[in-house]
Amino acid sequence: MAKKYSSLLLFFLLLNSLPNSDASPEYSRPPPRPAIFIGPTRSESDPEQVHISLVGKDHMRVTWITSHKHEKSIVEYGTSPGNYDKSSMTGERMSYRYFFYNSGEIHHITIGPLGPNTTYYYRCGGNGPEFSFKTPPSTFPIEFAIVGDLGQTEWTASTLKHIGAKDYDVLLLPGDLSYADTQQPLWDSFGRLVEPYASKRPWMVTHGNHEIETFPIIYRHGFKAYNSRWLMPYQESGSTSNLYYSFDVAGCHVIMLGSYVDFDAQSDQYMWLQADLAKVDRVVTPWIFVLVHVPWYNSNLAHKGEGESMRKSMEELLYNARVDVVFAGHVHAYERFTRVYDNKADPCGPIYLTIGDGGNREGLAMIFENPSPSISMFREASFGHGRLKVHNETHAHWSWHRNNESNNTFMADELWLKSFASSKSCLPHEKFQEMKTHIKDEL
Ligand SMILES: [Fe+2]
């Protein structure tokens, strides 16, 4: 087994000259912490790399991988340990090939309906260890943990430990998961690294540049491993692509955009976003949060201006609909902007946050432009994660936690947010109302 992995790794290391890296000569970074590689620890028939994700109002998708092709795709579950009074075989299974690498069998099974705020115990494939998860609440309060650009280094392990040390309901990840960068065994290693966290709470992710993994002629469309392993509930939100989607949870509408999918005004993603925003009922989901990998606002020298064409295409849609917050990754640092629209402070624009500081092997993006632009309120190149606690229809609390702090309650940055749904001065723009009427007429 070890020999098979080392030869595969060597092969993919040779391939790793593709243009997916964040490396840039304009800034220098401190030495990153060592990479972590986790090989198989269970028997070949046992499930591994278990993670869960939300599907619809009261269902959960359980994803796991088996080495053997003929293991059963079944999830047994119940509300007390070892007592599985329900089971499901609803879903799909898949595997993929990438050059000489053959993935294990990837099982995606949907279970439910599930009660809110309830702990379930479950087993995958009829054998192996028992796992448990807690479903999110159906109403406020709800707490999100948010971090991008995770990778798999000792910094990543530190970030995950900090996230896991305090309870939360749903993890949101704005792109760049495993940093496998075509070295497929690293996707498996990443699955094992995050399993203790991603099997307990739903992980909702969108893609970054490290998920692309294109190769000329052979893998032109990319995202082969990502789409196979991290299947998100895109069909439920009317999207035709796993690369962008939305979902509702406890009064929040969360939109996951795709930085590396067409986003111009004629694109499928743009049309879908228009229709998705038009469908949001602010009485049911007063809050709208958007995640996208490449930041539209960024005063770090790393990746400066990369999000500009997407911003120019889509910013007006989010502004007119009164999106509350836009989270991004890509830049390996933390930055918080004020409410912004079209590069200017605007009380009716979203707060923009960059939270690409999960701990990947490329290290931190150390250099910010000087002087700081007036719309940038806080910025720091440290690894860490964010938490968004949505208390009720009107108020939410954002906090950023550095990994360097041993005290988990310490907040290096924090901010209280008031929802646009409760604002009388920032009603949805008249252009948004016109678009909504137009879209409804078409349906
Ligand atoms: Fe990135």
Image: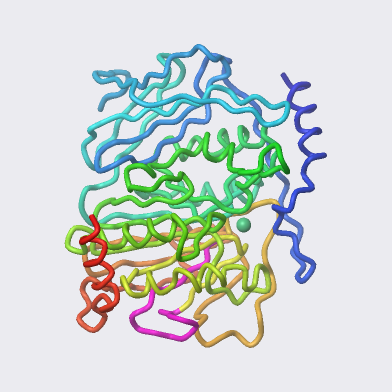
Q: Which of the two residues, 393 or 272, is positioned nearer the viewer here? A: 272
Q: Which of the two residues, 214 or 326, is positioned nearer the viewer here? A: 214
Q: Which residues are magenta?
A: 338-356
104 in relation to 166, above or below = above
The residue located at (31%, 22%) in the rendering is: 88
Residue 183: horizontal and vertical position, in percent? 71, 37
The residue located at (28%, 64%) in the rendering is: 287
Residue 399: horizontal and vertical position, in percent? 42, 66
Query: Dividing the picture into quarters, in which one does residue 119 lie?
Result: top left
Q: Which of the two residues, 301 or 395, is positioned nearer the viewer here? A: 301
User: On the picture, is 266 further left or further right than 208?
Assistant: left
Residue 317: horizontal and vertical position, in percent? 38, 70
254 in relation to 101, above or below = below
User: On the picture, is 96 further left or further right than 72?
Assistant: right
Q: Is residue 339 magenta?
A: yes
Query: Dividing the picture into quarters, in which one does residue 291 lie?
Result: bottom left
User: On the picture, is 364 further left or further right than 67?
Assistant: right
366 in relation to 182, above or below = below
The residue located at (44%, 72%) in the rendering is: 315
Assign the N terminus to one quadrant of the image.
Answer: top right
The residue located at (33%, 80%) in the rendering is: 348
29 in relation to 89, above or below = below
Q: Residue furthest left?
A: 283
User: On the picture, is 80 further left or further right than 126?
Assistant: left
Q: Residue furthest front?
A: 442
Q: Is residue 363 magenta?
A: no
* Quarter of the render that holds ligand 1: bottom right
Residue 285: horizontal and vertical position, in percent? 23, 59
Assign the C terminus to one quadrant of the image.
Answer: bottom left
Q: How many marks?
A: 0
